[in-house]
Image: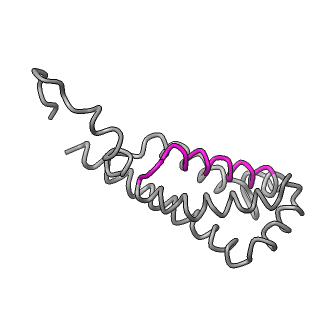
Amino acid sequence: MYARVRDVTLLLARIGVAVVFIAHGLQKWDNGLDATSAMFAKTGLPLPTAAALFAMTVEILGSVAFIAGFLLPLVGIGYAVVGIGALLSVHVDNGLTGQGGYELVLVLALTGLALGFNGGRISLDHLLFWRKRERPKLGEPVPA
C-alpha cells in the first residue's frame, strides 16, 4: 500500500509543478515570441530568441509530458535550466525572499529536477521503459 500512496503523491507533485510551469509558458505564449525575446534580451540572456523558444517549449510541451510522465529526466533537466536562467537573470538581485525573490524559482527548478528522476510508477516512462526491468526472472519470488 505504501508504494501506491508514494506513486500517487509523486503524480500529484508532478501535476502541481507542471501547472505552474504551464502558466508561465502560456504567459510567454500570449506575449508572443518577439516580446518574450525582447524581455529576455533586457535581462542580458544570450541568444534571447533561442532562450525564449526553449523556455516556452519546456514550460508548455514539457509540462504536458511531465504530467503524463513521459521523458521525465529530460523535462526535469529542462525545468532546472529554465529555473536557473530565471534565477540568475531576473531574481538574484532581489534576494531569496520578498518581492521578486528567487525562493519560488529555486523550489520549482529543484523540485522539477528531483521529480524528473523520481517520478513514480504512474508514468509513461515506467510503463514504457522501467516496468520490464522490474519483472522477476524465472524462479525468483514475486515482490509484494
In the picture, residue 113 is in which quadrant? top right
Picture coordinates of residue 85 (x, y %)? 75, 51
Instruction: Tell me what residue is drawn at x 39 percent, y 50 percent.
Output: 10
Above or below residue 127? Residue 133 is above
Residue under the image location 71 percent in, 62 percent down:
53
Q: Quadrant of the N terminus?
A: top left
121 vs 104, left or right, is left
Q: Please check the rendered image and state whether residue 141 is part of the magenta-colored stretch, yes or no.
A: no
Question: For this rendering, which residue is in front, 6 or 67?
Answer: 67
Report whether 79 appears left or right of 142.
right
Front residue of this view, candidates 136 and 114: 136
Residue closest to the far bottom: 30
Assess whether residue 75 is covered by the magenta stretch.
yes
The residue shown at (38%, 46%) is 125
Rendered view: 96 above or below 34: above
Which residue is outermost to the top?
Answer: 139
Left or right, residue 12 beside residue 77: left
Residue 61, horizontal then vertical, whole percent: 55, 62
Question: Magenta-highlighted stretch: main secondary structure?
Answer: helix
Judging from the image, the colouring scheme is one colour
Magenta part of the chain: 69-88
The x and y percentages for residue 144 are 14, 35
Q: Nearer the viewer, residue 91 or 21?
A: 21
The x, y position of residue 134, in whole percent, is 26, 32
Number of marks in the rendered image: 0
Q: What residue is shown at x 52% (from left), y 58% (from top)?
A: 17
